[in-house]
Amino acid sequence: MSSSLVVCEVDESLKDKLKKFRFRKETSNAAILMKIDMEKQLVILEEEYDDISMDDLRNELPERHYKYVHDDGRVSYPLCFIFSSPVGCKPEQQMMYAGSKNRLVQTAELTKVFETRNPDDLTEEWLKSHLSFFR
C-alpha cells in the first residue's frame, strides 16, 4: 500500500536535472542532493556536486554518480539513489520523506536504491557492499 502513496511531487526542473545527470558523460563522481519543500509539498534540488569523494559527500548530508573500480580492473559508473531523511525530523516530515521516495525513484527511473538512517554509515565500503548485489 505504501508503494502507491504519493505525498510530494517532483519539481519539473529537478526532473530535467535528474535526466541529464543520468546520462552525463563525465567520469568524476557526482551527486545531486534533494530536499522536500514542506510548504509546496515538492521534492526540489538542494545542491549539485561534481568530482566529490564519498567522505566529502557524507559531510554534505544534513541522488550519486559513483566511480566504481571492479576487482578485475573494469570501471563502471553506477547511478545510485541513497535515501536518507534528516535525523530528528518531526514525524510528519519523516512521513513526507518516506512517502515521496517511491515517486522520486520512479520519476528518475532508478534501479539501485539504498537507504541509510545514519550518514556516518555512508562510506566507500558501505556502497561497495550494497552494489555487490548488482554484479
Image (cartoon, rainbow, N blue to C red):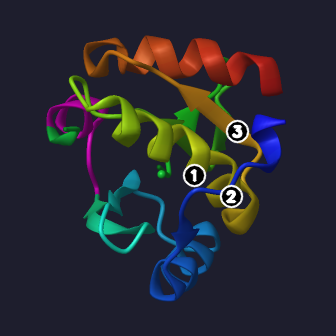
Res 11 label: none
Q: Which residue is mark 3?
A: 112
Residue closer to the observer: 134 or 75: 134
Q: Is residue 82 placed above or below 18 in the rendered structure?
A: above
How far is the residue under mark 2 from the one under mark 3?
15 Å
> Mostly what secondary structure, the magenta segment?
helix
Residue type at the position of mark 2: Arg
Marks 2, 3: nearer the viewer: 2
**Of marks 3 and 1, which one's residue comes earlier in the chain?**
1
Res 103 label: 2
Q: Check disc 2 and report its element: helix, strand or loop.
A: helix
The residue sitting at 67% across, 24% down in the picture is 131
Q: Is residue 118 visible?
A: yes
- In which image quadrant can residue 118 be found? top left
The residue sitting at 53% across, 25% down in the picture is 115
Q: Residues within 10 Å of mark 1 (few under 14, many from 20)?
A: many
